[in-house]
Image (cartoon, helix red, strand yellow):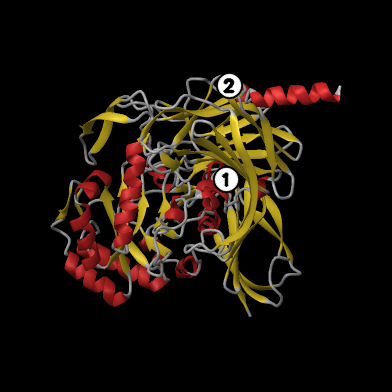
Amino acid sequence: MRLLFTLLLLFRLLLGNAQTSVSSPDSTIQVAVTGGKTLMISAQYRGTDILKPSEIGLSIRQVNANWNFGKTSIQEKDEKIFPPVPEKRKEIRDHYRQLNIQFKSKISLQIRVYNDGFAYRFASTRKDSITIEREIARYTLPDHTMFYGPPVNKRPDVDIFHTSFEEPYLITPTDSVSADLLFFSPVMVGYPNGVKAVLTESDLEDYPGTFFKFNNAELLEGVNAPYPLGFKMNPGEFPQEVVTRRADFIARTKGNRTFPWRVFMLSEKDAQLPSNDLVYRLGAPSRVTDTQWIRPGKGTDEWIIGINLFNVPFKPGVNTATYKFYIDFAKRFGFQRIMMDAGWSESTDLFKINPDINMDEISTYAKQQGISLSMWTLALTLSRQLEPALKQFKKWGVDFIMTDFMDRDDQKMVNFYHKIAKACAAEKIMVMFHGASKPAGFSRTWPNAITREGVLGSEYNIWSEKAHPGHDLLLPFIRMTSGPMDYEPGILDNATKKTFRPISEKVMSMGTRMHQAAMFIVFESPIQLFSGNPSQGLLEPAFMELLGSIPTVWDETFVRDGKVGEYIVTARKKGNDFYVAGMTNWNGRTVEVDFSFLDEGNYDALVALDGLNADRYPSDYVIAKQTINKESKINFTMAMGGGFLVVLKKK
């Protein structure tokens, strides 16, 4: 019998239909791979099937698919990463086991398994360039799973791969998801026993980003935008290049390279997800050698409120007086910069400056006040005028720019992100992409690409009811796991579900003032843009001083409690001080915070809470002082759509 088994095993190996596996350092995650005619992967987490046997692979035009195993090896590494911009923490442990499988087609597979997730990617060692026809990712899920994903809203004049990556989440059992829907990542899968998996990617370069669709109740399939071949200009206030014709392949690229990581972040408790930095660990190391000039911090942005100031001795608008007012506001409350958003120049020419603006005067005044300038740009215009525009920005003292309206992540657009980040780094300018896909490890590779949109945030209050507290409580668990997000919190006109109206230039937010304030701690963005009305802020100096005291990068992050879509309590450390914030959906609730994470000694705590009447008048809040130490356990009550925050300064 033993001889028969040995012969069968030998025969299987000769056919190339081999199987191997790798587990996480703590053995809680197991990933198995089977080779042969097809390449199959499966995964378990603490006994839960995350993936049933699922087909993966690359279809390369110049290569005959051959998934027979060649050489295999397993290595374990336990190293530390020290991010130049600490989004979650200043020291990241990078501890994993990696399975390496060589195939006979000069293609290899790498599988990294951590204690909080796993990832795989393909690599090629071919000498010549290659054409990737498609990537195969057919994930077979167990029965009775839930799906959380943002579906693309198909625009009438372009194909479905054009999207601003800003949509509400669909939450539904997987067996009820329409096969007609296409989702951008990250997405989440919930398992019957409460385990969650967030699916996304990292180290995306010279390759299209990944969408997902369901082929049936259990089969979640990765989809990549085909390579763009033809374009046209969509006219309007913000002209945009859109694709009119696509190829029958997804990428043309060099043959000797690695491909993006396919990432699965795993947790048995929801609260473990927001502090997961697996995507960052998998990003390519920094290509910016000197990072001392990168300056995280807070800024103002005038676009959401439509510059509808009051109690000022000038006519507000896109003009010199307004921007000097914003500079004074930033200076007073401890912000580091102001954003000059769309309108400071013609969108199609960065050198045709609005005649109501004197850039030399604004630049000189900002330097005198110690405030940096930030500038909005249209992506198409920035690409065309890149080198002279960046040099002009430097002369004005601009250290941060936004570029907007990409709305794609096919191979050409992904390469655009890298091109802009590289050019900005050369001029020591930080950059943020709006109308863009999720970061996918980009901020590790280009730490000057300090934040990114790819999120349905505050601006949606102008024209919709989509940015509600329930939506806000999905973001830390799903979107934020893929990297920093520019939500632009801080709206000061706050409304209940009943009283909210989307009104341009009189913009309000759903939920309480403390819900907005808590975002500055809960939502990660090394540059946080305050979107509220400064005229209102000047009437509430204690509140604005509180916001001004909150850092935007962190030594450590502890998510104390939370449930997807319902509530979260986040604690962060900076130096000797701690910052704690909570947010809830439309259900008011009381949460107990155990402060045992504090260091020894007493802390002077500034505590900001929903006011007694915040359930009807959401701008109602109270700020109080108390002493807190690591023995403290305190109940915090949040109104409907409410929140709280605590700033703890070491005595």
Decide if residue 120 is on the left or right side of residue 144: left
Q: Which mark is residue 363?
A: none
Mark 2 is surrounded, within 10 Å at the Cα level, by few (under 14), some (14 to 19) or many (20 or more) other residues, namely: few
Residue 315 sits above or below residue 119 on the image: below
Residue 384 sits above or below residue 647 on the image: above
Front residue of this view, candidates 276 and 151: 276
Which comes sooner in the sequence, label 1 or label 2? 2
Q: Residue at x 38, y 73 (%)?
A: 332
User: At which x and y percent is residue 258?
Assistant: 47, 42
Quadrant (top left/top right/bottom left/bottom right) for the N terminus: top right
Total marks in image: 2
Which amino acid, by three-letter code, is at mark 1? Leu
Which amino acid, by three-letter code, is at mark 2? Lys
User: Residue under circle 2?
Assistant: 37
| Closer to viewer: mark 1 or mark 2 | 2
User: Residue under circle 1?
Assistant: 473
User: At which x and y percent is residue 166?
Assistant: 43, 39
Q: Is residue 511 visible?
A: no
